[in-house]
Amino acid sequence: MEAIQYAVSVGSWVRSALKWGRRAFWFFTAGLGAALTIGENLQKLPGMISGTLSALQGLFGG
């Protein structure tokens, strides 16, 4: 009888571990995708900043 209870508790533990593992995997892949997108935008950022600065200099006759 105890063996059955043990098997059931192990089964529920495994199920919850798989559920959390899947959540962690999705969270990781979503975070990785966001990080890659942010990285691409950061590479474009210096050009955007210098473009904005030169536009401002042009506006103020710098």
Image (cartoon, grey):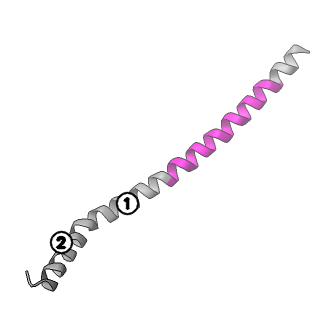
Q: Which residue is drawn at the image coordinates 67% and 38% (left, top)?
A: 18
Percent of width and height locating residue 58: 13, 84
Q: 5 and 57: which one is in front?
A: 57
Percent of width and height locating residue 27: 55, 49
Report if residue 7 lies within the magenta region.
Answer: no
Q: Which mark is residue 11?
A: none
Q: Which residue is drawn at the image coordinates 51% and 54% (left, top)?
A: 30
Amino acid residing under circle 1: Ile
Query: Would residue 56 appear left or right of 19 to someone viewing this image?
Result: left
Amino acid residing under circle 2: Ser
- Give how far apart the Cα atoms at labels 2 and 1 are: 19 Å
Residue furthest to the right: 1
Q: Earlier in the sequence, mark 2 or mark 1?
A: 1
Residue matched to label 1: 38
Query: Would residue 43 appear left or right of 59 to someone viewing this image?
Result: right
Q: Is residue 7 above or below residue 12?
A: above
For label 2, count other residues whose C-alpha is less than 10 Å away and answer few (under 14), some (14-19) or many (20+): few
Q: 29 and 54: which one is in front?
A: 54
Q: Nearer the viewer, mark 2 or mark 1?
A: 2
Residue matched to label 2: 50
Q: Is residue 43 above or below residue 56?
A: above
Q: Quadrant of residue 2?
A: top right
Q: Secondary structure at mark 1?
A: helix
Percent of width and height locating residue 36: 39, 58
Percent of width and height locating residue 7: 81, 23
Quadrant of the drawing holding the N terminus = top right
In the image, the segment drawn in magenta is 8-30
Q: Is residue 39 above or below residue 10?
A: below
Q: Secondary structure at mark 2?
A: helix
Q: Quadrant of residue 51?
A: bottom left
Residue furthest to the left: 62
